[in-house]
Amino acid sequence: MFLARRSVAPARQQLLRRQQPRRFDSHAAHHAAPANESFGPSFYVAVTTFATGYVLYRIHKASQESGSETWLSSLIRKWTPLEKVFEERNAIRTAAMEKAAVDRHLFASAPGKEYIDLKMPELFNAGSPYNVPPGSQADLSAVAAYYHQKNKEIEEQRVARMKDGKVVSIYD
């Protein structure tokens, strides 16, 4: 197997040496027959478009100089809304924007709540413990002690109800 691999490389080199070199300018040897090429339809469409536009411009200018209105101008005026319509729309929109601004100022100047309703004391520490700048959090030990005392009283009341043989649930 190794012998077969060693013999492939020299054989390939010999084949490459015997091969005629490539010439990339081989198209110079034989020329194509001259072709009769036309301009194509796009050329004629473009020329016709420019000529038609020029003729329409000259007709429009001639009718303007004579003082009469062209059919194109009358068509545009026919389908354009009157200035009165624009004034009415602008007045309605301006009134709506002023009312929205008054409402926004009303809500922005309203005082906010001075307290936050908390259902449980764990909500005090609901934020992320990472990237907290020092001194930004208050000492909440008094608040935690208050809630511990409140829970202790509720538990004592529940135990007292259980001893009496009454209701066991805290909600009853």
Image (cartoon, rainbow, N blue to C red):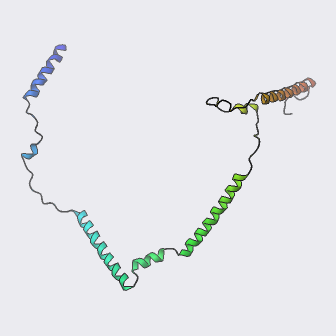
- In terms of depth relative to the viewer, which is nearer, 137 or 2? 137
- In terms of depth relative to the viewer, which is nearer, 58 or 23? 58
The part of the image, by quadrant, that contains residue 19 is top left
Residue 98, image x and y in percent? Answer: 65, 62
- Location of the C terminus (image quadrant): top right
Direction top: furthest residue: 2
In this rendering, the answer to whether 164 lies above or below 112 is: above
Q: In the displayed structure, does residue 122 sit left or right of residue 83?
A: right
Residue pictured at 34% horizontal, 79% vertical: 61
In this rendering, the answer to whether 24 lies above or below 74 is: above
Residue pictured at 10% horizontal, 42% vertical: 25
Residue pictured at 84% horizontal, 27% vertical: 149
- In terms of depth relative to the viewer, which is nearer, 153 or 7? 153
- Location of the N terminus (image quadrant): top left
Q: In the displayed structure, does residue 7 sit left or right of residue 42?
A: left
Residue pictured at 27% horizontal, 72% vertical: 51
Badge count: 0
The part of the image, by quadrant, that contains residue 13 is top left
Residue 142, image x and y in percent? Answer: 79, 29
Residue 34, image x and y in percent? Answer: 9, 56
Q: In the displayed structure, does residue 128 sit left or right of residue 23?
A: right
Direction front: furthest residue: 135
The part of the image, by quadrant, that contains residue 56 is bottom left
Residue 4, image x and y in percent? Answer: 16, 16
In this rendering, the answer to whether 17 lies above or below 49 is: above
